[in-house]
Image (cartoon, rainbow, N blue to C red):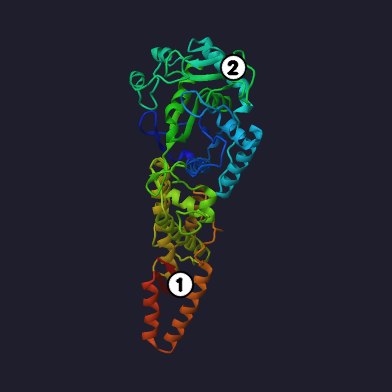
Amino acid sequence: MQLYKEHQIKLYNSLTGKKENFKPINEGYIGMYVCGPTVYSNVHLGNVRTFMSFDMVFRYLKHLGYKVRYVRNITDAGHLENDADVGEDKITKKARLEEIEPMEVVQRYTVDFHNVLNTFNFLPPSIEPTATGHIIEQIELISKIIENGFAYEVNGSVYFDVHKFDETNEYGKLSKRKLEDLIHNTRTLDGQSDKKNPQDFALWKKAEPQHIMRWPSPWSDGFPGWHLECTAMSTKYLGEQFDIHGGGMDLKFPHHECEIAQNEAAKGVSPVNYWMHANMLELNGQRMSKTTGNTVNPDELLSGNNKFFSKAYAPSVIRFFNAQSSYRSVLDLTDDGLLASEKGFYRLMDAVNLLDSLKASETSSIDIPAWKQRCYDAMNDDFNSPILVAHLFEAVKYINQVKEGSETLSIEDLNLLKETINNFVYDILGLENNAKSDSGTDKLSGAVDVLIRLRQDARANKDFAMSDKIRDELAAVGIQLKDGKDGTTFSVN
């Protein structure tokens, strides 16, 4: 029996604004699409946070036994600098600045993107399509939208007619925006004279003579609009309707709103049953921004070569930090927060490393099946990783208690504890146990072991004052000694 038959997931659907029971279109199968990066620069740490959250979702769905087709695209063309559909393609602009071919820009930063995600132990998606690899599908989609009366061509460019669409559909239902409010708040902008209305958006743009990336189409030599590619690629690989569409909160409007409109205009159906949005990553309580300098990239965070953090942090420490906050919450990246997460991460791993040394008893004094169910309940509640982490620290307490001899576990419960911890720590949260702390964990362990031996010698010589002094002074600096029938162990609090 597949695990998913035993576990009902509730997830927050951005479309309805509430948690709903998750039911796939086809039992046992899930189609999931997540908007990927625009590869004109090194991947932003905020994007990494979004992809990390959906990596955890992907891992949990696979763990439950679903056959998941996870599609995450690469935007390698056609992404204008602003939502007014004017300006220059970001990749073309980068190519001009560096005097290289646009596809050299794409290659360089696609490799960087994959390297960063590999460093953080991401699972690869099932399919990773590119926008330039699906120009034909995008042209066909535009033709269908025009045929259905929801788009118009002007001077070689094609625009989606938002007002026409809103007459029979609801533009703004995802972002909870009304078209009349958008009209009221829109100023007339230069460069929009081809549009019937400022709210209309480009499906195809005629390329100016200096524009490098261009493709032939029935309307002009040009390039697709920003929103079109995701509609074309998601439906090509997942069908006209699929289960989950994810992305950053900043994409809800206009990008995802326009995806819905394009699909309904072309195919008459809303494409996605459950919309999921990961919230933003802040740095020291403020929005990350290259303009203000309040930003740090993944390499700088991992190497410690930055002005914001006191040290380098291991990739799994950063994953653990991310797991301690709901994907729907704003996450504030601070040095104090990472230091606390690092301490918690190594405390968790110390306990995991003790598992194989635990000795089974005839009976259990801890209800491990109930603890296991609490772990699943947390993840079934909209992938509530902070609550899961809290339950993992319950297991840390259990492990230390069994080690000390104050609690017992039968062989069945001990094996269940090991299996469950491995499932959640490694397979679902994606943590790795090979990360080394820059704080000298190995040296600390060696030094404390020396003090433990000196304390044992003092007790053997009945010098209990010295024995107590060693214990108390270690406790004062956060190192707790624990005497058990198998000897003395320590933990860092």
Question: Quick check: can you spot residue 422?
Answer: no
Task: Sort mark 2 into few (<14), some (14-19) or many (20+) by Cα contacts within 10 Å.
Answer: some
Q: Give left or right: position of 66 versus 186.
A: right
Give 419 or 266, whichever is nearer the viewer: 266
Q: Quadrant of residue 144?
A: top right
**Residue 489 marker:** 1
Give 271 or 255, whichever is nearer the viewer: 255
At label 1, the amino acid type is Thr
First-in-chain label (2 vs 1):
2
| Residue 483 location (% of width, % of height) | 42, 75
Q: Give left or right: position of 216 versus 65.
A: right
Name the residue carrying label 2: 140
Q: Quadrant of residue 102?
A: top right
Quarter of the C terminus within the rendering: bottom left
| Residue 303 location (% of width, % of height) | 54, 55
Give 461 or 365, whichever is nearer the viewer: 461
- Mark 2 touching mark 1, by CB under 8 A? no
**Residue 231 marker:** none
Question: Quick check: can you spot residue 35?
Answer: yes
Q: Give left or right: position of 266 versus 139.
A: left
Under circle 1, the secondary element is: strand
Task: Sort mark 1 into few (<14), some (14-19) or many (20+) by Cα contacts within 10 Å.
Answer: some
